Image (spheres, rainbow, N blue to C red):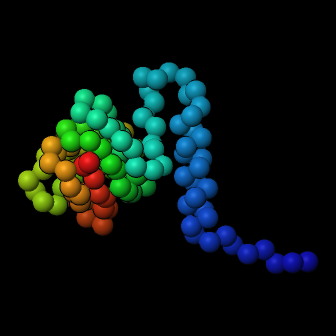
Amino acid sequence: MPTLMRPPRWATLALAASLLILAGCSDGGDTATRSPATPATAAHGSGGASSHIAIKDFMFSPVSLTVRPGARVTVANQDQTPHTVTFTDRGTSDTGRISGGKSAGFTAPKKRGSYSYICDIHQYMKGTLVVR
């Protein structure tokens, strides 16, 4: 009988991302209790439009989000512990502390560029906001 090999970590992560995408496409019932869908790739927002970052399992999703200058970005903390989206340049606004299961937001900078952010509580959590 052949021995079964464990799939590589990237394959497991790809499967998990696919399931998240499919879950976002389903009709989950009452929209008042659902979290926003988590895009698997960079999303494009415009001034006044909203883009989303999810925090789950101590990771930002997507890790890199592309938006237009001045776009509103909503951050949904799907973990039970508090997190932040804190820009490392400290000149850009951030979310402040977001309790588990809650959401907060910020307005993207008007200046085009790449902005790195972390969770100020768990500084190994990293992401990038690209403003185009």
**Residue in the picture at 62% in, 72% down:** 8
Q: Which quadrant, please, contains the N terminus?
A: bottom right
From the viewer's side, name the closer residue of 97 and 10.
Answer: 10
Question: How many numbered marks are there?
Answer: 0
Location of residue 7 with respect to 30 vertically, above or below:
below
Task: Indicate left or right for 7 with 106 as reference.
Answer: right
| Residue 62 visible | yes
Rendering quarter of residue 3: bottom right
Residue occupying the far left of the picture: 91
Q: Quadrant of residue 5?
A: bottom right
Write the residue at 58% across / 58% down.
Answer: 14
Q: Looking at the image, which residue is at 57% across and 54% down?
A: 16
For residue 23, side relative to residue 45 (left or right): right
- Report whether residue 99 is seen: no
Q: Kindly identify the residue that appears in the image at 55 percent across and 43 percent down.
A: 21
Residue 34 percent coordinates (x, y): 45, 30
From the top left corner, tell me how far across and down residue 127 is, in percent.
31, 58
Measuring from the top left, give residue 46's x and y in whole percent: 28, 35
**Residue in the foreground of this view, choosing between 35 and 109:** 109
Q: Residue 115's x, y, as percent?
A: 21, 57
Quarter where residue 7 is shown: bottom right
